[in-house]
Image (tube, rainbow, N blue to C red):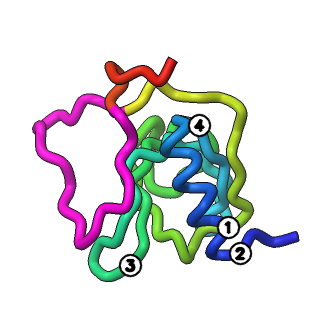
Amino acid sequence: MPVTSGEVDGLILQAITERRLMQLKLNGLVRIVEPHDYGLRKGEAQLLAYQIGGQSASGGLPEWRWLKVDKMSDVSLLDATFPGGREIPNGIHQGWDVLFLRVADASNSAD
């Protein structure tokens, strides 16, 4: 059964909160990502994710990706987790119209 947009929203929020990897399809390619920031950017729901596996048409991995939520399909949470927020090379977070949720820093362990 396909995942609805409301279910995708819930899965993204859960993945960020629990620091779980996600698998999804975008533009027909399977991607494995660490979800970091979720919100509205340029008027669209988007996920800023660090892609660590799967396929990419635009370059090598790992790499940061902007993912438009309405373009995602086959979204699922994996059992594997990741430590949390990554070091930002320039120290500046991306601008958001509205930020719904940001993953906790790796130093803020939930354990």
In the picture provided, is 52 more to the left or to the right than 59?
right
| Kind of residue indicated by mark 4 | Arg
Q: Which residues are magenta?
A: 85-104
On the image, the x and y values in percent for residue 22 come to: 62, 46
Q: Which residue is mark 3?
A: 44
- Which quarter of the picture shows residue 109? top left
Q: Residues within 10 Å of mark 2 (few under 14, many from 20)?
A: few
Helix, strand or loop for disc 1: helix
Q: Disc 4 to disc 1, how far (Cα)?
A: 16 Å
Q: Secondary structure at mark 3?
A: strand
- Find disc 1 in the rendering and name its residue: 7
Vertically, is 19 above or below 98?
A: above
Q: Quadrant of residue 32?
A: top right
Q: Residue 40: which numbered mark, if any? A: none
Q: On residue 20, which mark appears?
A: 4
Q: Earlier in the sequence, mark 4 or mark 1?
A: 1
Q: Residue flagged by tag 3: what amino acid is it?
A: Glu
**Sequence-first disc among 4 and 3:** 4
